[in-house]
Image (cartoon, rainbow, N blue to C red):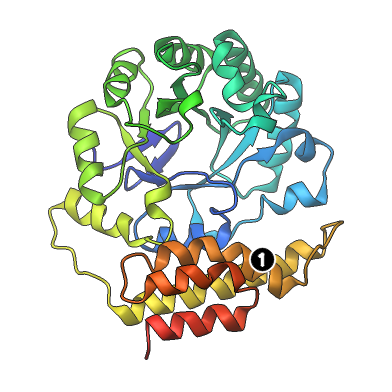
Amino acid sequence: MKQQLKIGNVTIATPVLLAPMAGYTDTAFRSICMRYHAGATFTEVVNATGIMINSKQTLHLLETVPEERPIAAHIYGNDPAIMAKAAIVIEKLNRFDYIDINCGCPVRKIVLRGCGAALIKSPKLIESIVKAVRESVSMPVTIKTRIGFEIDQNNVVDLVQAAESGGASAVTIHARYAKRIHNGPADWASLKLAKESCSIPVIGNGGVECANDVVRMFNETGVDGVMIGRAAVGNPWIFDEAYCLMQGKPYTQHTPQEHKQIIVEHLSRMLELKIKEYKVRRRKKNPVECSTALNFRAHLFRYIKGMRGCGEIRRKLQYMNSLEKLLESVNTILPD
């Protein structure tokens, strides 16, 4: 099991990374995960065209804070020239350590544009995009993809070799088919196959539910890094536990007071971000505090999982449209 991960000239001290997740991995959540030994983070998926034309709403997604580095700008598109121009903009921001190209998002509206998981069907286009981006910037370039698009049509070898041929410094593989989205068991055997098929680092993703799964993925597949997605939502401590397991150190369970502190801090920082977002957003359906509350409910749902009284709060979450109601529920389940 490797103790660090090299992506080009970037050294990631702990090879356990936070996955990019739209609606979840904003700078507020990313920086909290980094505090608990996440090795690196990614922005939410960002439209390369929006970056290229300097859309204020798009560029808002590229806001970062120093404590969340190393961090990658996670972008999508299918035109090599546009992707290259977006990469140039990103490098000039001087906020990121590398650029990650989305070749695996299964969201319908992205796939219908020929982006995200649609690229799985065209390894040669992936190679062209990686090459164009790599030649336009000095920073490392990576991709995130899946083992295949259609169920039982595995082309993971073609994908990792295309990425490597284009000049990618690493590749992340979600061990499910795009058609399955997040359903069904993850195919870790395909991660092992991917690792054996290229000479660049391979990061495994999918099927990690707990810290022990991180160690198991390393041991069973030989990957160079492990990426955690949904299992980290509401549980940033998973990175700390995985870190301790990998270092052979005892893990000290966080206290209820720390749990509550992180929830409150996360909500507060999300509000700060939402205020900034509202300054550039064209359409404002709800007041800023209401919008923050609505967005945070998905996080709170996971933060309180398994706690006494969580069922009652979950039933009421859909009616919680203010910060006061959210904090009241937190105080109910985690009193001082």
Q: Quadrant of the C terminus?
A: bottom left
Tell me which corner region of the image, top left, top right, bottom left or bottom right, holds residue 102: top right
Say if 294 sits above or below 107 in the image: below
Residue type for callout 1: Leu
- Locate residue 290, reporting x and y percent: 70, 72
Farthest-out residue, bottom: 336
Q: Which residue is mark 1?
A: 273
Residue 90 higher or lower than 175, as above or below: below
Residue 1 seen in this snapshot: no
Location of the N terminus (image quadrant): top left
Local crowd at mark 1 within 10 Å, few (<14), some, or many (≥20)? some
Residue lying farthest to the right in this orientation: 282
Secondary structure under tag 1 reads helix
Residue 186 in view in this figure: yes
Q: Residue at x 82, y 59 (%)?
A: 280
Residue 20, position as x, y percentages in the image? 52, 44
Residue at 33 percent of width and 36 percent of height: 225
Q: Is residue 199 left or right of residue 295?
A: left
Q: Residue at x 64, y 72 (%)?
A: 271
Is 59 above or below relative to 189?
below
Dividing the picture into quadrants, the one containing residue 249 is: bottom left
Residue 317, how many percent across, how many down? 54, 69
Q: Is residue 233 above or below residue 136?
A: below
Rendered location of residue 48, percent (x, y): 72, 34
